[in-house]
Structures are given as C-alpha cells and as structure tokens.
Image: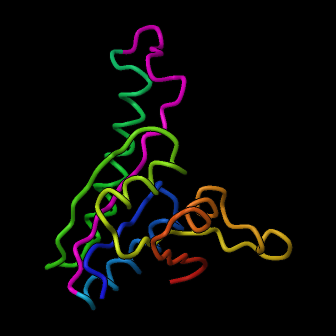
C-alpha cells in the first residue's frame, strides 16, 4: 500500500517519535523510506562569523545531516532508507520533495498541545497537511 514513505525530521522529540512510527509502517508494508531534514538557510546562506571556517549555510546543512544520521540509526534492519538535506523553506521543500519522489505517505510529528493550541498544528505540519496531495500522518504525543 505504501511503497515510498517520506519522514521529514528537525531534531525534535516529536519528529523522532514520528520517525519511529514511520519506520513501523514501512516495516509492515515493505516500504522504502526517505528521511529528510530541510536546511533552511534563508538570508544567512553566505554569512560567515569572524574566525569561522564554514558559512552559516554549511553549518546549518551539517546540523541537518547530523539530525538525519541520528534518526536513520534508529531504523530497523531491512528497511531501505534514502536521505537528503534539501534547502529552502521547510514548508515548501517537504511538499516539493514528496512530489519529486512520488511519495505515498508523509509521516510528520506534531507537538500535541492542549486547549486552543490543540486546534493548530505546527506551522510547517499544518502547511504540508493543507497543501500536499499526498496523505499525511501526523503523529503527536506519546509513542
């Protein structure tokens, strides 16, 4: 049913929980998983602090790659995983990446707040749910 699952991560505990759920679904369906962390460099792309050897964009991309490594290390054996660090706005990069790989499902985390905040997903998650033509599983709260 799900041949390709996209799991966007950002280093948060919510994204890690969602990734575990995405890996569970992939194991049940024999899916290929794509794990991405968007390197949202914005206007800082070329900025370099005095005494630093890398630009802000390189530092942000390096952090995104580290986040992906941590998540992929949790993938059960036998699940095929592809990784990427697209750049740009997370809101649009996730939808564009999902479309480019013809994903069947996007699995994302949400903070799972209560009260009025409960009605609002994170801005990135809300955008993906609203804009994407691909099914989105929003995993919030506990495991």
Label tally: 0
Residue found at the far right of this picture: 116
Instruction: State the image coordinates of residue 101 (x, y, percent, origin top left).
Output: 28, 61
Question: Residue, x 55% and y 51% (percent of image)?
Answer: 91
Q: Say above or below: 118 vs 67.
A: below
For the record, the magenta segment spans 30-52
Q: Specify whether 97 is left or right of 130.
A: left
Residue with the most extreme left position: 78
In the rendered view, how is the structure colored? rainbow
Residue 102: x, y in percent?
31, 66
Quadrant hosting residue 30: bottom left
Tell which of 65 and 33 is nearer to you: 33
In this view, 101 is above or below 118: above
* Residue 82 screen position, x and y as percent: 21, 60
Q: Main SS of the magenta segment?
A: loop
Q: Looking at this rendering, what residue extends furthest in the bottom direction? A: 28
Of the pair 86 and 23, the residue shown nearer to us: 86
- Residue at point 58%, 68% (across, down): 129
Please state, as top left, top right, bottom left or bottom right, where the N terminus lies in the image: bottom left
Seen in the image, is 126 located left or right of residue 62?
Answer: right
The residue lying at 39 percent from left, 30 percent from top is 59
* Residue at x 27% of width, y 70% of height: 33
Residue 70, image x and y in percent?
A: 32, 58
Q: Does the magenta portion include 17? A: no
In this view, the residue farthest toward the top is 50
95 or 15: nearer the eye?
95
Query: Is residue 37 shown in magenta?
Result: yes
């Amino acid at each position: 049913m799900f041949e390709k699952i996209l799991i966007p991560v950002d280093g948060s505990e919510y994204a890690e929980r969602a990734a575990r759920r995405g890996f569970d679904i992939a194991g049940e369906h024999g899916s290929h998983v794509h794990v991405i962390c968007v390197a949202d460099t914005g206007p800082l792309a070329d900025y370099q602090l005095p005494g630093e050897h890398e630009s802000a964009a390189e530092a942000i991309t390096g952090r995104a790659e580290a986040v992906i490594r941590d998540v992929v290390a949790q993938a059960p054996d036998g699940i095929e995983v592809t990784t990427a660090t697209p750049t740009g706005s997370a809101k649009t990069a996730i939808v564009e990446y999902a479309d480019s790989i013809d994903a069947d499902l996007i699995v994302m985390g949400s903070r799972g707040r209560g009260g009025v905040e409960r009605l609002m997903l994170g801005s990135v998650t809300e955008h993906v749910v609203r804009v994407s033509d691909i099914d989105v599983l929003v995993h919030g709260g506990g495991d």
